[in-house]
Amino acid sequence: QVQLVESGGGLVQAGGSLRLSCAASGSIFSINAMGWYHQAPGQQREFVAVISSGGSTDYSDSVKGRFTISRDNVKNTVYLQMNSLKPEDTAVYYCSAHSGYGDPGRYWGQGTQVTVSS
């Protein structure tokens, strides 16, 4: 089992920035990629970004150029730097852990709320 604990959500004005963190613990040897998804009220959970153990990254079109995913393999922590935030970025953000870079999320954090006011 892998445990994921997110932090860093909050309320920010449009155009502002937030950085989310996700610390992984447990059987992390089984994990080769970590990512972020978000879920707005009444909508399905959607992919935001993913990073492999080697540092390869991928982003959804809606956040490309504004968000940056990074990881610290020593601390087993993944980060999501969110800049130029928009009201439509408002959602619960979930950290995910994947067996492989192209695999769906296998483990999930509890979620952290991000609210962007206009």
Image (cartoon, helix red, strand yellow):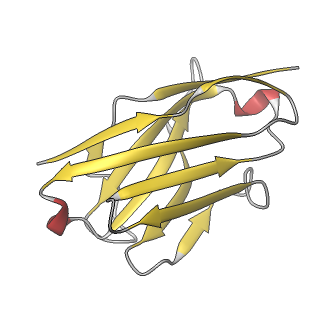
* Placement of the C terminus among the 4 image quadrants: top right
When asked about the image quadrant of residue 66, the answer is bottom right
Can residue 44 be seen in this snapshot? no
**Is 87 situated above or below 26?**
above
Find residue 1 and report its horizontal and vertical position in percent: 11, 48
Residue 103 in sight:
yes
Q: Quadrant of residue 33?
A: bottom left
**Image point 38% across, 71% down: which residue?**
101
Q: Position of residue 4 (x, y in %)?
A: 29, 42
Q: Is residue 38 above or below residue 47?
A: above
* Residue drawn where x is 16% and y is 68% of the image: 29
Residue 12: quarter of image: top right
Q: Position of residue 88 (x, y in %)?
A: 76, 30
Residue at image coords 58%, 68%: 58
Residue found 38% across the figure and 55% down from its top: 77
Side (left or right) of 40 relative to 5: right
- Which residue is most to the front? 74
